[in-house]
Image: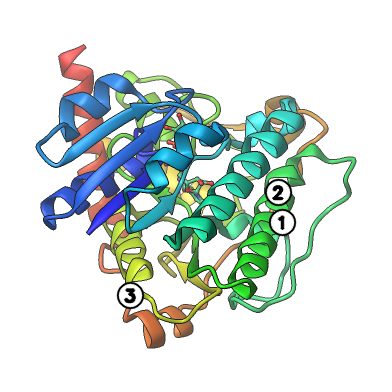
């Protein structure tokens, strides 16, 4: 199969491209490199059967050309990161909606199946755990920029379902906090790379809030397997939770990383307001119900948190030694 991966130079995208190439597929990647790293991408995923195109998913003419030659598109390109949401909500809203609309319209016109990357963020701060695909969403006020990403992704899901009604083959994968080698460790990136980088450098490990908030972190291999299974899904316009259901508090995570890295770093609590400003509010817990993805896709996570952390730490340690 020939697969177009949007955002393929990013964290999840670069792992997906590798998996697709290993599975014998041909891959076309489009990425504007606004967040993806050219160095990582070309260093580790450049092979026969792969074409990389630097460009934007909003570029209608370019996307039309690419879409004509592929059988399926996995649409990962997005603007994300909690700090980006609170600081620049317009960038998040426009950077997500405009490109997705383009992808869906052109995929329908060319009869190309779409797998759309959504997020557990869309459940918001609902306390009805675990989250089922059809659970209610509970979001905060629009005065809190933090919710703009969840809102944009939810609207994109509505677009997917709308286009499914017009005959587009589309599957929505709702990822729960993916982590692993190559995840971004910038202030805009996610918590695991941030903690590991701090621990390896002997710097304070920053826990926002009181650390009792919990998440289900999903090792990248499981995220990729869920994505590959979503590519094969036959049920049109359906949503699937793709994640681990092993819950850990952020304080426990910091302690685990400190132990696994053998670090002397102190763990420091930073109030949310100081770290992320007044436009932030946290979601206390987030756990997926995997009944549907297990029953329909045959998905179940297989990498335990400790094992995934050890693999991720090994990657960051090796990278630190190279620098
Ligand atoms: N990482 C997670 O834990 C997680 C969780 C839930 C959902 N997701 C979703 O999965 C997808 C991939 O996330 P990721 O963690 O790999 O993020 P990432 O930032 O590493 O990758 C996104 C890629 O998209 C590219 N990009 C951004 N805007 C673009 C545009 N207009 N045109 C072309 N390329 C563009 C970036 O350069 C980057 O390489 C996103 O849609 C994200 O919302 C990720």
Position of residue 115 measured from the top left corner of the image (x, y, whole percent):
44, 60
- Tell me the residue at 65%/29% (across/down): 84
Position of residue 125 measured from the top left corner of the image (x, y, whole percent):
73, 60
Tell me where residue 104 sits by quadrant: bottom right
Crowd around label 3: few <14 · some 14–19 · many ≥20 (10 Å): some
Q: CA distance from mark 2 to mark 1?
A: 5 Å
Tell me where residue 260 sits by quadrant: top left
**Would you say the residues marked 2 and 1 are in contact, meaning their CB atoms lie under 8 Å apart?**
yes
Sequence order check: which comes first, mark 3 or mark 2?
2
Q: Which mark is residue 48?
A: none
Q: Is residue 209 visible?
A: no
Q: CA distance from mark 3 to mark 2?
A: 27 Å
For label 1, being within 8 Å of ligand 1 is answered no
- Tell me the residue at 73%/25% (across/down): 87
Residue tagged 3: 300
Crowd around label 2: few <14 · some 14–19 · many ≥20 (10 Å): many
Image: 267 above or below 229? above
- Tell me the residue at 19%/38% (across/down): 50
Q: How is the image coloured?
A: rainbow
SS at mark 2 in the image = helix
Position of residue 62 in the picture relative to residue 95 (left or right): left
Position of residue 65 measured from the top left corner of the image (x, y, whole percent):
41, 39
Sequence order check: which comes first, mark 1 or mark 3?
1
Q: Which mark is residue 152?
A: 2
SS at mark 3 in the image = loop
Residue tagged 1: 155
The quadrant of the image that shows the C terminus is top left
Position of residue 276 measured from the top left corner of the image (x, y, whole percent):
70, 30
């Amino acid at each position: 199969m020939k697969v177009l991966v949007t955002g393929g130079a990013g964290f999840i995208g670069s792992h997906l491209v590798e998996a697709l190439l290993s599975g014998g597929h041909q891959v076309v990647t489009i990425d504007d490199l606004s967040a993806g790293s050219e160095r990582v991408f070309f260093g580790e995923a450049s092979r026969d059967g792969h074409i990389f195109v630097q460009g934007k998913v909003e570029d209608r003419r370019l996307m039309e050309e690419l879409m004509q030659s592929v059988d399926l598109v996995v649409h990962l390109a997005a603007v994300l990161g909690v700090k980006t949401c609170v600081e620049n909500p317009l960038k998040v809203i426009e950077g997500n909606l405009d490109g997705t609309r383009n992808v869906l319209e052109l995929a329908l016109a060319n009869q190309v199946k779409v797998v759309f990357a959504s997020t557990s963020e869309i459940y918001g701060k609902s306390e009805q755990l675990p989250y089922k695909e059809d659970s209610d969403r509970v979001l905060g006020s629009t005065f809190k920029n933090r919710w703009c990403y969840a809102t944009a992704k939810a609207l994109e899901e509505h677009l997917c379902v709308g286009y499914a009604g017009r005959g587009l083959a589309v599957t929505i994968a709702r990822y729960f906090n993916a982590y692993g080698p190559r995840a971004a460790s910038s202030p805009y990136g996610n918590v695991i790379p941030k903690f590991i980088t701090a621990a390896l450098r002997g710097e304070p490990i920053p826990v926002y809030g009181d650390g009792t908030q919990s998440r289900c972190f999903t090792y990248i291999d499981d995220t990729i397997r869920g994505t590959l299974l979503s590519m094969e899904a036959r049920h049109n316009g359906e949503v699937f939770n793709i994640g681990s259901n092993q819950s850990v508090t952020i304080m426990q995570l910091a302690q685990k990383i400190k132990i696994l890295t053998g670090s002397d770093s102190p763990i420091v609590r930073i109030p949310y307001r100081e770290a992320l400003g007044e436009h932030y509010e946290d979601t206390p817990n987030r756990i997926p119900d995997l009944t549907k993805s297990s029953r329909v896709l045959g998905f179940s996570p297989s990498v335990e948190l400790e094992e995934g952390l050890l693999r991720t730490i090994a990657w960051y340690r090796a990278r630190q030694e190279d620098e």
